[in-house]
Image (spheres, rainbow, N blue to C red):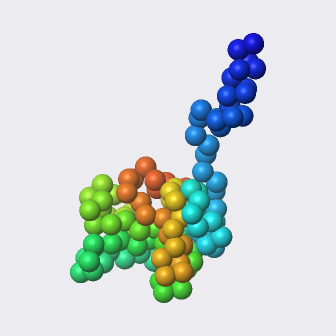
Amino acid sequence: MRRWFLAGAILAFGSPLPLAAAEVIAQQAGSHVGETATVCGAVVSANYSVRTKGQPTFLNPDRPYPQQVFAILIWGTDRAKFGSPEVQHMSKRVCATGVIQSYKGKPEIVATDPGQLSVRRSVAV
């Protein structure tokens, strides 16, 4: 009887455990705006814009700025948690997990916690 109740509750309310985010390659991120996903790619350009409002750090997987297909954005208020991400993650395959947003037609994930980023492996550049 308990099994049927639990199965019915899961069907009615969803799983009590959070589902893992779907993994997406950087070039496909634009097709997943509004979704929570893990986007992966080799960081080929990175910039800490210290003189820009909000002091953003941008990590651009697969294609460099301004032809980027996806960006990982770390605002200056969160930067101390990440160290020097533009140095640490350059030329590495990085995955970012979060809600994919669109800014000026380009998909991005705003990373507020280092746990959102993982390095999968280094890449030859």
Q: Nearer the viewer, residue 65 or 32?
A: 32
Q: Position of residue 114 (x, y in %)?
A: 39, 53
Image side of residue 28 versus residue 55, left or right = right
- Residue 91 seen by the camera: no
Q: Residue furthest top?
A: 1
- Asked if 8 appears above or below 113 in the picture, the reply is above
Q: Position of residue 39 (x, y in %)?
A: 57, 62
Q: Position of residue 82 (x, y in %)?
A: 33, 57
Q: Residue furthest bottom?
A: 66
Q: Residue at x 67, y 28 (%)?
A: 9
Q: Residue at x 72, y 34 (%)?
A: 11
Total numbered circles: 0
| Quarter of the view holding residue 30 | bottom right
Q: Nearer the viewer, residue 57 or 98?
A: 98
Indicate the quadrant containing the C terminus: top left, top right, bottom left or bottom right. Answer: bottom right
- Residue 74 seen by the camera: yes
Q: Residue furthest left?
A: 51
Q: Position of residue 117 (x, y in %)?
A: 46, 56
Indicate the quadrant containing the N terminus: top left, top right, bottom left or bottom right. Answer: top right
Q: Residue at x 49, y 54 (%)?
A: 118
Image side of residue 85 versus residue 95, left or right = left
Image side of residue 95 versus residue 4, left or right = left
Q: Nearer the viewer, residue 82 or 120?
A: 82
- Asked if 2 appears above or below 12 in the picture, the reply is above
Q: Residue at x 46, y 53 (%)?
A: 116
